[in-house]
Image (tube, rainbow, N blue to C red):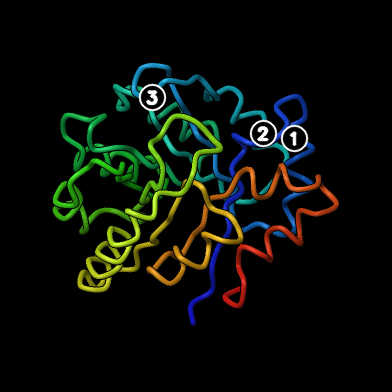
Amino acid sequence: MRPIQIAPSLLSADFARLGEEIKAIEPYANMIHIDVMDGHFVPNLTFGAPVIEKLRLWTTLPFDVHLMISPVDPFLEDFANAGANILTVHPEASVHVYRTLQVIKELGCKAGVALNPGTPLGRIEPLLPVVDLILVMTVNPGFGGQAFLESQLPRIEQVRRLIEGSGREILLEVDGGISSITAPLAINAGADVLVAGNAIFNNGGPAHYEESIQALRGKNG
């Protein structure tokens, strides 16, 4: 039984006290998930590199930065320099995504690629030799608090088989509608990392962060 990593999503945290939120969650989380949205690639605006640079001072946990921006290539260096440890991009946001992933690794970060619900699985198969993380979206990207799309469970299973067939150590991350109810579904389908926002930050406050995270891990913690 593989250990499950939890990446709390700052999209659901209190924006007025993000540093304090990170410190409160730090003892129980494996990494911090930061959604970067540009209002163009997805219909929302969130964090920029200067915010991430300041948040980097609050923790040594890895920053798992999901770049929902287009074009993405001009900003890779900014986010790497701001303190990102993992940079995940969408194939649709880069003309030459293989090269984009190579650049991310050259910048000293782990390289991730994201699959929207409508992205063909074939888009990531050629990327297996260079990718370190595959993110399967179980909602349409752009907003927190959406319902988990169970239609994506077969997609998670397919990605797990691709990873196992590659012979490489690639993390399978799932993001969207993750709760104590849907987490076991994602885990059973093959997830290594669960991204969760509302299920952690809006579930009784900091006093319940440990309990909320353990509920997501279940027996796989």
Give the Cα separation between the discs numbered 2 and 3. 23 Å
State which mark lies toward you, 3 or 1.
3
For residue 76, side relative to residue 212 (left or right): left
Give the Cα separation between the discs numbered 1 and 2. 6 Å
The residue beneath circle 3 is: 42
Residue at 66%, 57% in the rendered image = 29
Q: Which amino acid does label 1 sit on?
A: Gly
3 or 97, which is in the foreground?
3
Residue at 55%, 63% in the rendered image = 5
Label 1 crowd (10 A; few <14 / some 14-19 / many >=20): some
| Numbered tag placed on residue 19 in the rendering | 1
For residue 131, side relative to residue 16 (left or right): left
Query: In the rendered image, which quarter is residue 220 located in?
Result: bottom right
- Look at the numbered discs 1 and 2 and tell me whether their residues touch, using CB distance below 8 Å: yes
Figure quadrant of the C terminus: bottom right
**Vertical comparison of 24 with 164: above or below:** above
For residue 38, side relative to residue 164 (left or right): right
